[in-house]
Image (tube, helix red, strand yellow):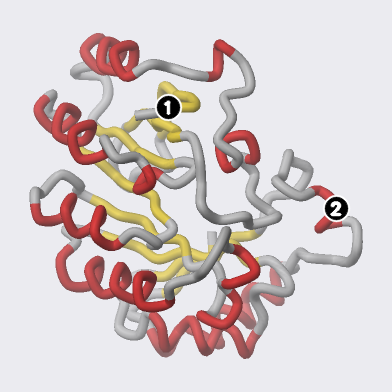
Amino acid sequence: MILGGLQKNSLIDFPGTVACVAFTSGCNFTCPYCHNPDLAKGIVSDVDDGITPSEFFAFLEKRKGLLDGVVITGGEPTLQKDLQGFCFEIKNMGYRIKLDTNGSHPRMVAGLLEQQLVDFVAMDIKSNLDGYPSLVKGSFQKQALMETVGLLMEKAPAYEFRTTCVRPFIDLEIMAGIGEMIKGASHYILQHCSRNVSVLNPVFFEKENRFFQDHEMLALQNAVKSYVVKCSIR
C-alpha cells in the first residue's frame, strides 16, 4: 500500500461513524477539478505527508475505543494491489471500513464485497458515459464502470453514488443520462465543486465559470431525483 496521508479524525466522511481517513496515492483519472492533485498524480509531496502501513496500524492500535471506522480514499484506492490485505488487517482490529472509489476496477470491489471487508462504499459518478473519456487516462471501459454500479446496488451493505457538479461534465441533459446509469439507487448525492483550493488543472477554471449556484443545483436535483430513491445536495 502506498499511503499519501492520514486525517486523524473525521465526523463527516463516514455516515454515523467517527473515523480516520487514509489517503492512497495514484489515480487513473485526470479530473481537472480534483482537489487532491498530488495524490492524483501519485506524489507524496513532503515526507510528513506520507505514512507507512506499519505507522498507520500503530496509529489505529492507539485509537481503539476512540475511533469506530476507517475511510480509505485517494487518489483511487482500488489501484492498490494490497488493498484487500490492508482492509483485512483493519477489520481484524475491529474497525468498520468505508471505501471511496471511482468505480473503474469492479474486480477489486467485488473481492472486497465477497470477503465482507467493506461496510460502506461511496462511488463517484463523474458524468454520463459519454463524458468519461476526457477524464480518464488511456481507454475508458464503460462496462467496468457499470459493473461496479451493479455490484454496489446488489451486494454492498451500504452505498451512495455522488457527483461533484462541474461544467461541462454536468448539465441537465447529462443528469438524465446519469439517472439511467444508477436507476433505482438508494441514495445519490450532488456536491458543489470546492472553490479556492488546489486543483489538478488550475487553467481549467480560468476559461469560464465552471461552478453551479444554489438554484442551479436544485434544477440538477430535479432532473435526476425521479430515477433514484433519494437525491440530496451536499
Q: Earlier in the sequence, mark 1 or mark 2?
A: 1
Element type where label 1 sits in the image:
strand
Looking at the image, residue 100 lies above or below residue 71: below
Graded by Cα atoms within 10 Å as few (under 14), some (14 to 19) or many (20 or more), the crowding at tag 2 reads few
Q: Residue at x 76, y 64 (%)?
A: 211
Q: Is residue 226 above or below residue 91?
A: below
- Please state the horizontal and vertical placement of residue 70, each as a whole percent of the image: 30, 33
Q: Pick whichever, 52 or 56, lies toward us.
A: 52
At x 65%, y 69%, the residue is 134
Which residue is farthest right? 207
Residue at 16% across / 58% down in the picture? Answer: 157
> On residue 3, which mark appears?
1
Residue placed under numbered mark 2 in the picture: 203
Residue drawn at x 19%, y 29% as measured from the top left: 90
Give 204 or 16, whichever is nearer the viewer: 204
Could you tell me residue 113's position as x and y percent?
15, 55
Q: Are marks 1 and 2 in contact (CB under 8 Å)?
A: no
**Three-letter code, disc 1:** Leu
Quadrant of the snapshot with the N terminus: top left
Residue 69 in which image quadrant: top left
Q: Position of residue 43 (x, y in %)?
A: 59, 30
- Indicate the amino acid at tag 2: Val
* Left/right of residue 15 with respect to residue 233 in the rendered view: left
Q: Is residue 151 above or below residue 98?
A: below
Could you give the CA–CA distance between mark 1 and mark 2, rounded to whole angstroms?
28 Å
Q: Position of residue 115 (x, y in %)?
A: 8, 49
Total marks in image: 2
Callout 1: 10 Å neighbours few (<14), some, many (20+)?
Answer: many
Question: Judging from the image, what secondary structure is the residue with disc 2 in?
Answer: helix
